[in-house]
Amino acid sequence: MHRGLRELVQWVEAHRDDLELNPPATTAEIGALEQMLGGPLPTDLKEIYKRFNGGTLPVGTLLPAGNEPGTIGATVREYAEAIGGDFLDPELLLPFHRTLEGSLLAFDRSAGPVSDTWSIVDYYEDTGDHRLMYRTFDGWCRHCVAEFTSDDFGQDFDLDTYLRSGERHVEVEPDVATGHATVAHALKRAGRPDEALASYLAAARCVPPLEWCDWEALKVAALLGDRRAGFEAAHRLASRGPDTRWSARETTPGRTAEVLALLARRDDDAERWLRLLEQLQEQADASEAVLIQTLSAALEAGEPLPEPRPLREPVVPDPGDMDGWVQAAHESYAQGVCRDEDLLFDPGLRRLGRVRDLTNLLRIRREF
């Protein structure tokens, strides 16, 4: 029995009276489910079913072994129908747990034929999106126990508990991007941008990465003036790949180029940035390709960069008073109205940032 499973079983046994657990699954019930699935369940999951056949845990509901509504078998069929697949497909996701947020944790059976090596993804039924959450089932067990035994257990959700939960996830499985992304998001809201930047980069370095974390890292790096971190993020963003990667990155070649150029103009070695701009230009549509060419020409000539393309109407218009404008920007950012993108793409705020230091906006703590 793996460490995480052993610790989870011990915790459940110690708190069984406080939990709503089903009686243990029989060998016949487990066997019938495996026959329906066309292969064995992970050994550690079967060890749990021998002690209780699903039930309510503090982090959600462990689906019972079976084929009736609400069981693993029924949920697999529902998932297959939702995606237009065949529930007998041996590479179909295998849901086993419904989280408190309503998503499904599922074994990724496409990872290989050996059930004990399947990783776990978080699957969102409303969007069809899924992301790696745990490298192993044991990692999920260990994170559960870390949550149940922490000082935060039973406390109201807030920014600090959110951050510490992410940190516990990273401690259990440091090579999974999701934990780092959670920490990065929490640190960003906590007004700790330098640490958030490091966590965004950590998430982007994982395999598989969360590619949008490089976009977040590049924006923060540009606002902080961190060329080293910015180049690392920009280098990955500029790498060639299918068009679908830009959707995962949550940006475009042109937007990436505009932010990249802000860092490039502060660097004596412009050549390395120009190579990235060339790669981005090759992936851009016609209008963005022209924009990137203009940015490259400005950098090569040492001329001012062209005005950015605003994302929307100014959220902090110039009131005609510099101090009042800075104060309005502070208040807007604290309220979540003004975002990092506005600081980068709003021509007025970018102009304000050239004469007043707006990086302290990133150090404003914003509670949920």
Image (cartoon, grey):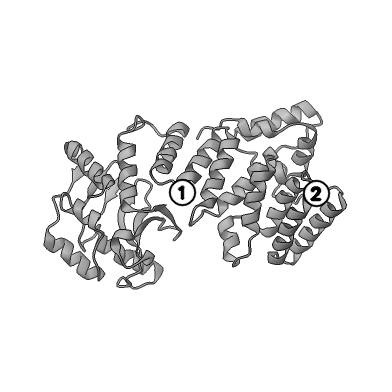
- The residue at 75%/37% (across/down) is 317
Q: Relative to 309, does residue 326 appear above or below in the rendering?
A: above
Mark 2 vs mark 1: which is more N-terminal?
A: 1
Name the element at disc 2: loop
Circle 2: residue type: Glu
Q: Nearer the viewer, residue 273 or 253?
A: 273
Residue extending furthest toward the front = 269
- Please state which of the two labelled residues, at mark 2 or mark 1, is closer to the viewer: 1
Query: Would you name the residue on which mark 1 appears?
Result: 178
Query: Would you name the residue on which mark 2 appears?
Result: 307
Q: Nearer the viewer, residue 37 or 227?
A: 227
Circle 1: residue type: Thr
Alpha carbons under labels 2 and 1: distance apart: 35 Å
Q: Position of residue 319 (x, y in %)?
A: 78, 32
Q: Position of residue 300 (x, y in %)?
A: 84, 54
Mark on residue 340? Answer: none
